[in-house]
Structures are given as structure tokens and as C-alpha cells.
Image (cartoon, rainbow, N blue to C red):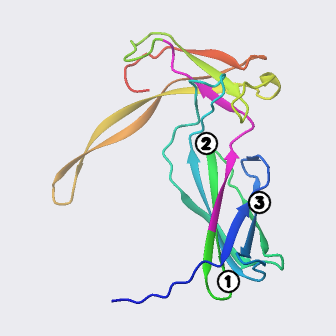
């Protein structure tokens, strides 16, 4: 059997975030602090910090954005981004910072900060916080065309409703002064069967996906944050 020595937690740590809206490429900041539960700060205590990032699909609950989809809808998982270590100052605090990566895929990213602080008795306490980084100062949302439930016939004009919003999901005011044009692309998935022969003459079959561009262009708009994008798919398939 095992005999373990139990020691109650003596310290607490927290991460505070400034009330700042972050965009692609901005420097993210936070403050780590730790103190004894009995009173007093952990001055000079060692800390370790790790930053992670992950793309996610953003949703808004405003009336204007109801039913619209935002972002590229890509699969993502949390990945390591950077780390740092040091010692808390005389006030039991440390300034944390990280240069966020430039966003090129149009996704919204969340950066997670995980920090641990070790006191003189080698007891470690951990804390975490998250911050959102927006790809731009506005978002583009799109809806399914009305009457498009189920299958749609080829060579049928479809009108996709779109909307421009701010980062809170409200319709963008005076969009012509903030957005020059709206570009679009309609892609169709196409899977091709490929046969490959190995060194022992065994025949293998695999499928390779291609994204076929069916339509593309741009939309110029005035002061209206909403509009319709008309597209006529010529081929059958998954778009």
C-alpha cells in the first residue's frame, strides 16, 4: 500500500485581462498574480506560462444576424503557440504578453493562457484565461437561399442573402466607407478514383478530393449592410 502526505492548498493564482478588443496581429497582454490564502503575496515566486490558439466558428444572437453563418467553417483544434517563464515581482505579479499571428483564413481565434506558480515549499497552483482575436473589424455572414431545402436543380438561379456586421453582430453602419467590395467564390467538391500499384504489384485504390471553382466575382455595394448574391450553379454536386 501507499502512504501519501496531504497538504492543503496555501496559495491562489489568477490571470486578469484588459478590456481591449484584439484583431489579427495584435499583441495580447495579461497580468498574472498570486497570493497566500492566509494573506500576503508570492513575491519572487517562479511561474511558467504557455499560450495556445484555436480557430472557432463565431455566432451572434442579435436580431440582424439571426440565421446567418460566419467564418470559413473549418475543423480546428487547440495547438501550442508559445511559452515563457520568470519570477513574480515584489507585488506578486507578472506581465504576460504574446504577439498574435496574422489571420489569413478569415477565422476567429481564441488564445488560451495557462500559467502555474510555484511557492517556496514547491507547491504549484495553476490558472488559465482566454482571449478572442478577430480577423477584421467586420464580419461577413451568409444564409442559405430561400426554398433551397433538399436538392436544388442545376441551372437554377439562387439568391444568397448576405450581411456585413461589426464584431458584436450588429449590422455594419455606413459599410461603403469601411469595405471596398465583397468577393465571393462558389466551389464544388469532386472526388476522383485513383489506382496505384505497389512494388509487389498489389493494386490500391484511393479517392482524391478537388475543389472545382464554379463561379467567382465581387459585389460593390453602397450604404446597405444587407444584400443578395445571385449565383446559378451549372453542375450537380456538393457545393
Q: Earlier in the sequence, mark 3 or mark 2?
A: 3
**Is residue 114 in view from this perspective?**
no
Along the line of sight, the residue nearer the viewer: 168 or 153: 168
Residue picked out by circle 1: 119
Q: Residue 48: x and y, percent?
A: 65, 75
Q: Residue at x 66, y 27 (%)?
A: 62
Q: Which residues are magenta?
A: 127-146
**The C terminus appears in which quarter of the rendering?**
top left
Q: Which residue is mark 3?
A: 29
Position in image of residue 33 (x %, y %): 75, 70
Could you tell which of marks 2 and 1 lies nearer the N-terminus? Answer: 2
Q: CA distance from mark 3 to mark 2?
A: 21 Å
Query: Mark 1, residues whose alpha carbon is within 10 Å: few (<14), some, or many (≥20)?
Result: some
- Choose the circle earlier in sequence order: 3 or 1: 3
Foreground of the two, 40 or 88? 40
> Quick check: is 145 in the magenta stretch?
yes
- Look at the image and tell me in which quarter the N terminus lies: bottom left
Is residue 57 depicted above or below 25 in this figure? above
Count neighbours of disc 2 (C-alpha within 10 A) and say few if under 14, some if 14 to 19, many if 20 or more. Answer: many
Amino acid at each position: 500500500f501507499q502512504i501519501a502526505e496531504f497538504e492543503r492548498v496555501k496559495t491562489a493564482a489568477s490571470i486578469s485581462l484588459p478590456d481591449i478588443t484584439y484583431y489579427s496581429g495584435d499583441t495580447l497582454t495579461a497580468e498574472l498574480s498570486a497570493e497566500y490564502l492566509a494573506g500576503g503575496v508570492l513575491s519572487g515566486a517562479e511561474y511558467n506560462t504557455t499560450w495556445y490558439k484555436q480557430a472557432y466558428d463565431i455566432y451572434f444572437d442579435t436580431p440582424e444576424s439571426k440565421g446567418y453563418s460566419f467564418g470559413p467553417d473549418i475543423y480546428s483544434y487547440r495547438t501550442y503557440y508559445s511559452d515563457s517563464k520568470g519570477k513574480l515581482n515584489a507585488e506578486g505579479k507578472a506581465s504576460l504578453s504574446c504577439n498574435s499571428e496574422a489571420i489569413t483564413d478569415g477565422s476567429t481565434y481564441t488564445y488560451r493562457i495557462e500559467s502555474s506558480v510555484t511557492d517556496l515549499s514547491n507547491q504549484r497552483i495553476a490558472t488559465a484565461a482566454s482571449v478572442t482575436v478577430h480577423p477584421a473589424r467586420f464580419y461577413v455572414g451568409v444564409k442559405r437561399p430561400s426554398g433551397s431545402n433538399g436538392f436544388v436543380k442545376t441551372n437554377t438561379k439562387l439568391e444568397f442573402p448576405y450581411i456585413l456586421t461589426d464584431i458584436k453582430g450588429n449590422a455594419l453602419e455606413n459599410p461603403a466607407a469601411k469595405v471596398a467590395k465583397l468577393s465571393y467564390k462558389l466551389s464544388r467538391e469532386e472526388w476522383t478514383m485513383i489506382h496505384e500499384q505497389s512494388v509487389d504489384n498489389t493494386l490500391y485504390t484511393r479517392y482524391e478530393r478537388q475543389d472545382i471553382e464554379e463561379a467567382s466575382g465581387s459585389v460593390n455595394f453602397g450604404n446597405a449592410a444587407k444584400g443578395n448574391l445571385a449565383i446559378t450553379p451549372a453542375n450537380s454536386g456538393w457545393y
